[in-house]
Image (tube, rainbow, N blue to C red):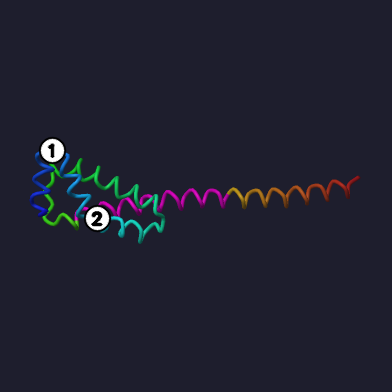
Amino acid sequence: MEDTVIINLYFDRSEKAIQATEEKYSKYCFSIAWNVLYDKEDSDECVNDTWLAAWNSIPPRKPAILSVFLGKITRNLAIDCFRRKKAAKRSTEHILELCKELEEIEDVTAYSLNDEI
């Protein structure tokens, strides 16, 4: 199906627009998400979120090149997902570092108390 027809379906608020977009661009958008995330489930979720974002943004906007428009949405969603996952890992690493420091402090404190007694 031609991109202009798909865009017109979005303007008509037809659900066939999402089906047509998925048929034509699902592999393209998945590859973009995969190259950022390297995770199948997260990539699938980004692609599905791309369809929703396209549905919500195309009626006021009319993209000149649909593939670029969808690719940009997918890329931004994948980067956001990557940052969320990275932030979660960073906080876990930080907690582990704090636990190690607390263990060291506990060892030093126990040693100091034994010397005093």
> Magenta segment: does it hold 90?
yes
Q: Position of residue 58 (x, y in %)?
A: 15, 45
Q: Position of residue 70 (x, y in %)?
A: 22, 53
**Which region is colored magenta?**
69-94
- Label 1 sits on a secondary structure element that is loop
Residue at which label 1 appears: 13
Q: Quadrant of the C terminus?
A: top right
Q: Which is nearer the eye, 76 or 24? A: 24
Residue for point 72% across, 49% down: 103
Residue at which label 2 appears: 72
Sooner in the amino-acid sequence: mark 1 or mark 2: 1
Residue for point 13% across, 57% down: 65
> Magenta segment: does it hold 104?
no
Amino acid found under the numbered disc labelled 1: Arg
Q: Which is nearer the eye, 73 or 114? A: 73
Residue for point 29% across, 45% down: 49
Crowding around mark 1 (Cα neighbors within 10 Å: few <14, some 14 to 19, many 20+) is some
SS assignment for the magenta stretch, majority = helix
Circles 1 and 2 in contact, beta carbons < 8 Å: no
Mark 1 or 2: in front is: 1
**Image-based side of 94 in relation to 113, left or right:** left
Q: Position of residue 28 (x, y in %)?
A: 25, 58
